Every structure is written in C-alpha cells, then in structure tokens.
Amino acid sequence: MGGIYDDETLDDLLIQGLKLIQKKKGFRFTLDSVLLGHFATVKEGDRAVDLGTGTGVIPFILSTRVKTLHIIGLEIQSEMAEMAARSVRLNDLEEVIEIRQGDVREVHRKIGGGVYTLVLSNPPYWTLKEGKPSPENAKALARHEVACDFEDVVAGAGKLLNYQGRFAFIHRAERLPDLFALLRSYELEPRRIRMIHPFLDRPARHVLVEAKKSAPAGLAVLPPLIVYEQKGQYTQEILAWYGRTQDVCGS
C-alpha cells in the first residue's frame, strides 16, 4: 500500500529534499534521533541496522552521509514499520533502506549475525520503575522499556556486529557508568562519547556513545554538543546539518 492516510502528515526533513510520514497524533521522531544520525561513524559500503527505527528517520539521515550504504530499520510495531516502509518508497530509497518488522531479541536469527559493520539505536530511556508509561502504545514503547530493555539492545548489537563493528546510540547522561559496564559485558568497548547539553551553561542531559566490538580500550571524549544558543534557537552546528545559518525550526 502507499500514499498518506488521513491521520498522518508528510513532513520535510529539510535534508536533501527527504520527506517522512508521521502520525498527526502519537509518536513522532525527536531531535535525539537526528543527533544520533549525525554522530555515528558512517563509512562507504557499511552494512547497518537501526534497532527500533520508528519512523525511519535515522536510516534516512544516514542515506545522505555516504554514497554507498545498505541499512535495515527494525521496528517491533507493525503499523509503524508499514508507515516507515511507505516513507522509503516515497523517497525512492528501496535500494538503500529496508524496513523489517521484528523483535530486537530475535533479529540476528532473521537477518544474520556477525555480518554488520554498524548498529544504531535510540532506545527507550526509562525503566518501568521510572515514571508512568504513556497510555499511547507507540509512545510508551519508545520512551519506556516495555518491549525490551537496554540490555536486550546491547545484546542484539553484539550478535549482529562483525569484528570491530560499531555500535552507536544515545541515552541519558546520568546512566553512563551503567551503560559502559553493560557494553563491556558484551565485548563492546566504548571508543567515542559526546555529552549533549541543552544550553552552554546547563548540565548534560544526554550522551552519544559509539563502541566497537572486540576492540582495545581507548576512549575519545569529543567536545560537548550544545543544542540551543537560546530558547527556540539552535546552535550553528545543528543548523549546518540543514544547510542553514538561521533557526527556522524554533523547537
């Protein structure tokens, strides 16, 4: 099936003319996915998997960064996966992006293990003990560890990646010690991190991490990423991703 349904919008990503189908109400992608899509190390010829792809925004961003790439977007919700697949067809990216419906805990059995060079994930940040999940199912699955927890994601990445393959993700900065411990328990060595601050004078709320499978220790701490110059105005680094010098988004 194709087209845009009455309960959906067609949104301009402001990147190389790409457009994305989203629900008018319910889960819509956030800046976190955009930050991850620009942070991950992407190389020509990469075979990549985005775990929990949602609307498919991360594969779309990656498709603009290198000329040759194949990326599978895995999404557990069948309706969301179908919508992301329509976005792929709408942008004529079928040769680059493939959307699969499935569970992160079983994905290596369906698409093969130990053969991918890059795995990405913008996982749920909150455990079921932290706050009340949204009554909207799509939002609950995106924000809380309802369908899987972060260990499931890390374990899945470890099974999918080849030797020295890269796993990039975004998470809450306060969980960084636990994140590192969990990565190492699955032979994924943290190699790059970048703290994300909403404003220059505010503490970091999130962190971008890239680990390598079976790699030696050696962590590069990158300069902090500042999101806003002031309220409603993105920094020049973020605006540059869209080829702009003035903030037209305001959010």
Image: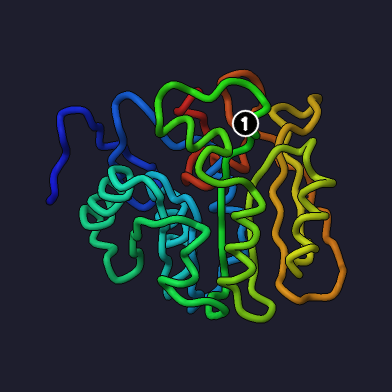
- Quadrant of residue 91 within the rendered picture: bottom left
Q: Measured along the vertical axis of the image, is residue 18 above or below residue 213?
A: above
Q: Nearer the viewer, residue 230 or 51?
A: 51
**On screen, 113 above or below 123?**
below
Relative image position of residue 128 (x, y in whole percent): 62, 31
**Residue found at x 53% / y 80%:** 115
For residue 153, side relative to residue 184 (left or right): left
Q: Position of residue 158 (x, y in %)?
A: 64, 68
**Residue 10 appears in which quarter of the rendering?**
top left
Residue at numbered disc 1: 128
Q: Secondary structure under badge 1?
A: loop
| Residue shown at the point (77%, 33%) measured from the top left | 204
Residue 71: x %, y % from top left: 43, 66
Of 233 and 113, the residue lying toward us: 113
Is 130 on the left or on the right of 14, as rendered? right
- How packed mark 1 is, by other alpha carbons closer than 10 Å (few <14, some 14-19, many 20 or more), is few
Q: Amino acid at mark 1?
A: Leu
**Residue at x 46%, y 72% (from the top left corner):** 109
Q: Residue at x 45, y 55 (%)?
A: 103
